[in-house]
Image (tube, grey):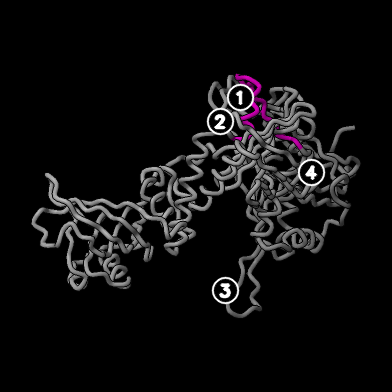
């Protein structure tokens, strides 16, 4: 049966009626002269003139509306998918206003459906866009058929009803509305695990597992990334394709490590890194990495067999500064493993404690670990005596100052032990020789950025040599140890020590050969 109006005339009738409804509702309907953005009107609410403080009143809402007119004996409107996309993705409120017209001679408007572009209509449009991409279709060539009663209840065609529908949708502040709409557009249609990254690695099983622990980079031959939405999986265009190199940064779990040796107990707060379970099941080997300061523990599980590799953290270079006590604890444990062994307990919040015993008397590193244990223990002893137990230094700097540290540590530990000190002065020093003479020895040496000073009472005798007078001590008594920041600080430290008839200073602040001088002259010695 022929309709009394053409589709174009029917559409124009509906748009004019919508403009009238807005005018009656006190709304400003701004018609779009060229409908290419998916809407026919920008409808502006008006300022509330009853409020005070006009300069700070909020702006009135503004919405986009697409008007669709259809015959009352049907329940369907059509709009291009590209226009629907514009509507649902607009950051502000947007609507489809469907007006139904009687097909009899009176051509009266019978009902109205105001569809707020949120919720189910958003899901339907986004799903159809994804289907179009799969099929290679263009959105502006696709007609989207919408049944108005599926998304909105039937309402009388009245200006108050129109205003109420628009006002209800604009209840949120513009910023809150924008956040809610952005959240909806970026979450609807996604299930857990929607984003998938596929990477082709090249390397041995150990290489790949170590890469997942963050221990090394891994070579990548190919990369592909896909996203599944509404059950439809599509590749991501911006994903790298490879080849290249990838480095993982695994998320650690907190744990506690306790180490018992024959002589000591060490407790650490640590982090444990685990390779994903699917990596372990693929290669039949499960690995974990524990880092506690500069201590590193690698764990490898082969069935019921556990292999543990304990060492200095490979990520901590020798020239990095750490607490000297940490160096001491590390190498004390490593050395203990080559002697009586060490018992380790690892506690996490999610699993039973892991316990294992480490004993490797045949280790190739045994001699090095024992040397470093003695060195770092000496350094810890010296800095504790100097009042700086929390001082930091690199292992490299401790090694350079090794002789000085071990000598001073021996004096601290065994105060009554005789130590031999030798130094040479110019031949014209006017002192009785061969002695013996009581002297105050002040010595300074550097450990990285730190300067350690110590003073001792020595008894020396002098003998003529080709280079001057060579002095040799027959006894030595340590009087004090300090960390100083300048030559002035060193002099101040020496003045606080018990006086001796003569004094001699050696080491870091002495650019030339030492000079023996009367103790009374210490106060006149220069200090920088």
Dot 2 or dot 3: first in sequence order is 3
What secondary structure is marked by label 3? helix
Q: Disc 4 or disc 2, which is closer to the eye?
A: 2
Q: Give the range drawn in magenta.
A: 193-214
User: Where is mark 4, residue-wise?
Assistant: 121
How many residues crowd around disc 4 within 10 Å: few (fewer than 14), some, or many (20 or more)? some
How would you rate the neighbour count of disc 2 (Cα within 10 Å): few for under 14, some for 14-19, many for 20 or more? some
Q: Residue, x 65% and y 46% (percent of image)?
A: 261
Q: Mark 3 points at which residue?
A: 56
Q: Nearer the viewer, mark 2 or mark 3?
A: 2
Query: Which corner quadrant holds the C terminus?
Result: bottom left
- Give the quarter of the figure containing the N terminus: top right
Question: Real-space Cα distance between discs 2 and 3?
Answer: 58 Å
Q: Which of marks 4 and 3 is nearer the N terminus?
A: 3
Query: Of 261 and 508, which appears nearest the observer?
Result: 261
- Element type at marker 2? loop
Residue 482 in view (yes/no): no
Q: Is residue 411 left or right of residue 243?
A: left
Image x and y of residue 367, in percent: 51, 34
Image marks 2 and 3: residues in contact by CB distance under 8 Å: no
Looking at marks 1 and 2 on the same chain, the residue that comes earlier in the sequence is marked by 1
Of circles 4 and 1, which is in front? Answer: 1
Q: Name the mark nearer the viewer: 1 or 3.
A: 1
Cα–Cα gap, marks 4 and 1: 50 Å
Mark closest to the chain's N terminus, 4 or 2: 4
Q: Are marks 4 and 3 in contact (CB under 8 Å)?
A: no
Residue annotated with mark 2: 216
| Residue matched to label 1 | 207
Which of pointers 4 and 1 lies earlier in the amino acid sequence?
4
Q: For the residue labelled by badge 4, is the local secondary structure a helix, a strand or a loop?
A: helix
Q: Is residue 87 left or right of residue 296?
A: right
């Amino acid at each position: 049966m022929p309709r009394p109006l053409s589709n174009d005339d029917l559409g124009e009738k509906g748009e004019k009626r919508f403009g009238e409804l807005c005018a009656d509702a006190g709304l400003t309907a701004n018609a779009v002269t060229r409908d290419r953005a998916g809407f026919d009107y920008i409808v502006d609410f008006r300022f509330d003139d009853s409020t005070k403080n006009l300069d700070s009143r909020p702006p009135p809402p503004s919405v986009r509306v697409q008007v669709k007119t259809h015959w009352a004996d049907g329940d369907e409107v059509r709009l291009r998918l590209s226009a629907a996309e514009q509507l649902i993705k607009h950051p502000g409120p947007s609507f489809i206003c469907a007006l139904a017209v009687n097909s009899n001679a009176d051509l009266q408007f019978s009902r109205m459906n105001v569809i707020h572009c949120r919720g189910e209509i958003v899901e339907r449009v986004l799903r159809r866009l994804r289907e179009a991409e799969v099929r290679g279709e263009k959105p502006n060539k696709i007609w989207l058929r919408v049944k108005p009663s599926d998304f909105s209840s039937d309402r009388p065609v009245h200006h108050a009803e129109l205003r109420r529908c628009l006002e209800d949708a604009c209840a949120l502040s513009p910023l809150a509305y924008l956040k809610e709409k952005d959240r909806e557009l970026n979450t609807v249609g996604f299930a857990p695990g929607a984003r998938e990254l596929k990477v082709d690695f090249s390397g041995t099983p150990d290489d790949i597992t170590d890469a997942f622990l963050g221990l090394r980079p891994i070579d990548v031959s190919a990369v592909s990334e896909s996203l599944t939405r509404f059950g439809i999986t599509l590749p991501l265009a911006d994903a790298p394709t490879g080849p290249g190199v990838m480095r993982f940064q695994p998320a650690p779990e907190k744990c506690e490590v306790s180490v018992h040796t024959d002589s000591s107990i060490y407790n650490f707060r640590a982090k444990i890194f685990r390779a994903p379970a699917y990596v372990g099941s693929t290669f039949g080997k499960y690995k974990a990495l524990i880092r506690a300061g500069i201590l590193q523990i690698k764990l490898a599980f082969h069935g019921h067999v556990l292999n543990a590799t304990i060492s200095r953290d490979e990520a901590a270079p020798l020239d990095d500064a750490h607490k000297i006590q940490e160096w001491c604890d590390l190498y004390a444990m490593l050395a203990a493993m080559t002697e009586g062994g060490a018992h380790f307990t690892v506690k996490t919040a999610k699993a039973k404690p892991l316990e294992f015993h480490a004993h490797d008397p045949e280790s190739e590193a045994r001699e090095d670990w024992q040397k470093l244990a003695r060195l770092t223990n000496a350094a810890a002893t010296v800095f504790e005596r100097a009042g700086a137990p929390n001082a930091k230094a690199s292992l490299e700097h401790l090694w350079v100052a090794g002789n000085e540290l071990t000598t001073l540590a021996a004096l601290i530990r065994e105060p009554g032990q005789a130590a031999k000190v030798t130094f040479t002065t110019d031949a014209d020093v006017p002192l009785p020789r061969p002695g013996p003479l009581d002297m105050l020895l002040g010595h300074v040496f550097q450990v990285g950025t730190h300067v350690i000073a110590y003073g001792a009472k020595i008894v020396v005798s002098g003998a003529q040599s080709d280079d001057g007078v060579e002095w040799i001590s027959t006894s030595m008594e340590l009087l004090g140890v300090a960390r100083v920041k300048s030559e002035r600080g060193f002099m101040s430290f020496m003045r606080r020590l018990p006086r001796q008839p003569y004094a001699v200073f050696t080491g870091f602040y002495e650019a030339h050969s030492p000079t023996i001088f009367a103790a009374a002259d210490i106060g006149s010695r220069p200090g920088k």
